[in-house]
């Protein structure tokens, strides 16, 4: 099967057959009156402080790590990042392509290594983010500022509207996926193994690295790096960059975020065409995740990649773009 036969090029048909609630709901209205009081989750504040302190220490001892350990940290970075980008995001949140069982298991493992909530909660909240973007019902509403959109939303209780809309969302597809539900049921154990134990013990067992270095470099430093790369999509990519596809929304095209988050920085495109598996019209350019999915397609492990047709993209650019669109 050729890749062209796997791609659906008719975006209008795709929009008509969408079963995932990831399209912005312009009927939602924020409640009038004072906002609910902010409730700080001190446990999360302490844990995030400890994590970033440990990551900073890990950065300081990088010179003492062997080359193999540093290469292993990079491998762990990409596995965990793909668990978020190709897994929780493009596969399970948006159903933008189909993945075989072996690929879904690999992505679930990577998602546990990333430790950003289980796939079920991640995908549910991300759909809420798209449907109610930058309103009180958005989990990481960028209107509340960079810090809140980046990390602050994890340090306080969710706004009541986020909880309410999340409960009403249709997530039957997530509940029907045995990989998603297995990971959800065994999430704490999977995180302990994938995020901490395996990154630490592999270099110790295979080439004699110290457990100390293994814990702080491929462990905490790598973990914090993936977290912040992902958070930049919520913060920086909603604030800085061009809006060539829809200038009415805040998400932007941010090349730095695209590079750091392995392809997730083409955010104005993504919020305009959330069903597109590539999250960009430029294929694998600055988009390692798209290159990975394309490779999985060529190996027969992924299929049915959905894409917005060039005609639909061009029409949208002309109708709602800010005039900054380029062809490559």
Image (cartoon, rainbow, N blue to C red):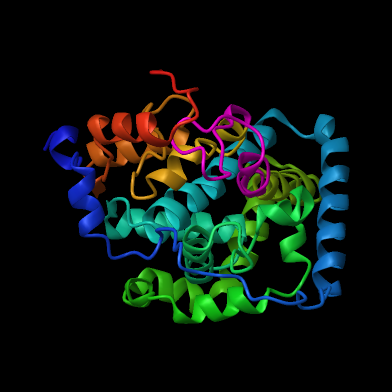
Q: Nearer the viewer, residue 61 or 66?
A: 61
Q: Residue at x 26, y 60 (%)?
A: 18
| Location of residue 110 with respect to 247 vertically, above or below | below
Residue 234 location (% of width, % of height): 63, 49
Residue 204 in sight from this viewpoint: no
Most foreground residue, 293 or 95: 95
Residue 70 appears in which quarter of the rendering?
A: top right
Q: Which residues are magenta?
A: 230-256
Q: What is the quadrant of residue 238 in the picture?
A: top right
**In front of the other: 88 or 145:** 145
Vertical arrangement, residue 304 with respect to residue 119, above or below? above
- Give the position of the N terminus as an image quadrant: top left
Name the image quarter holding residue 162.
bottom right
- How many callouts does the rendering have? 0
Q: Nearer the viewer, residue 170 or 250?
A: 250
Residue drawn at the location 43% of the way across and 19% of the way down:
326
Residue 19 visible in the displayed image: yes
Q: Is residue 40 left or right of residue 178?
A: right
Question: How far across and down, in percent of the image, does residue 69 sit?
Answer: 68, 37
Q: Where is the C terminus found, in terms of image quarters?
A: top left
Residue placed farthest to the front in the image? 32
Q: Is residue 78 magenta?
A: no
Residue at the image point whose x is 70% and y is 43% from the top:
225
State yes or no: residue 236 in magenta.
yes
Residue 217: horizontal and vertical position, in percent?
A: 75, 43
Q: Is the stretch drawn in magenta largely helix, strand or loop?
A: loop
Residue 179 in the image: state x and y as whole percent: 38, 69
């Amino acid at each position: 099967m050729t890749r062209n036969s796997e791609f659906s090029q008719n975006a209008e048909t795709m929009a008509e057959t969408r079963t995932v609630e990831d399209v912005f709901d312009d009927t939602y209205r924020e409640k009038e009156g004072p906002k609910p009081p902010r409730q700080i989750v001190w446990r999360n504040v302490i844990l995030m402080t400890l994590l970033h302190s440990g990551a900073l220490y890990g950065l300081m001892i990088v010179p003492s790590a062997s080359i193999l350990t540093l290469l292993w940290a990079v491998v762990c970075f990409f596995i965990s990042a793909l668990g978020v980008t190709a897994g929780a995001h493009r596969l399970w949140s948006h159903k933008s392509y189909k993945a075989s069982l072996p690929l879904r298991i690999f992505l679930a493992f990577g998602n546990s290594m990333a430790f950003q909530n289980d796939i079920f909660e991640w995908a549910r909240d991300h759909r809420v983010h798209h449907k109610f973007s930058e309103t009180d019902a958005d989990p990481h509403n960028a209107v509340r500022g960079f810090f809140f959109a980046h990390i602050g939303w994890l340090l306080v209780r969710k706004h009541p509207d986020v909880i309410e809309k999340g409960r009403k969302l249709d997530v039957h597809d997530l509940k029907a996926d045995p990989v998603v539900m297995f990971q959800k049921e065994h999430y704490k154990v999977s995180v302990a193994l994938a995020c901490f134990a395996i990154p630490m013990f592999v270099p110790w067992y295979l080439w004699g690295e110290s457990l100390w270095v293994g814990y702080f470099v491929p462990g905490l430093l790598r973990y914090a790096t993936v977290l912040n790369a992902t958070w930049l999509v919520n913060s920086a990519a909603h604030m800085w960059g061009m809006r060539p596809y829809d200038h009415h929304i805040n998400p932007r095209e941010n090349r730095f975020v695209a590079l750091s988050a392995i392809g997730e920085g083409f955010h104005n495109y993504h919020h305009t065409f959330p069903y597109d598996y590539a999250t960009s019209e430029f294929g694998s350019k600055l988009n390692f995740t798209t290159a990975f999915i394309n490779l999985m397609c060529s190996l027969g492990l992924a299929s049915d990649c959905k894409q917005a047709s060039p005609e639909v993209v061009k029409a949208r650019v002309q109708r709602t773009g800010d005039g900054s669109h380029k062809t490559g």
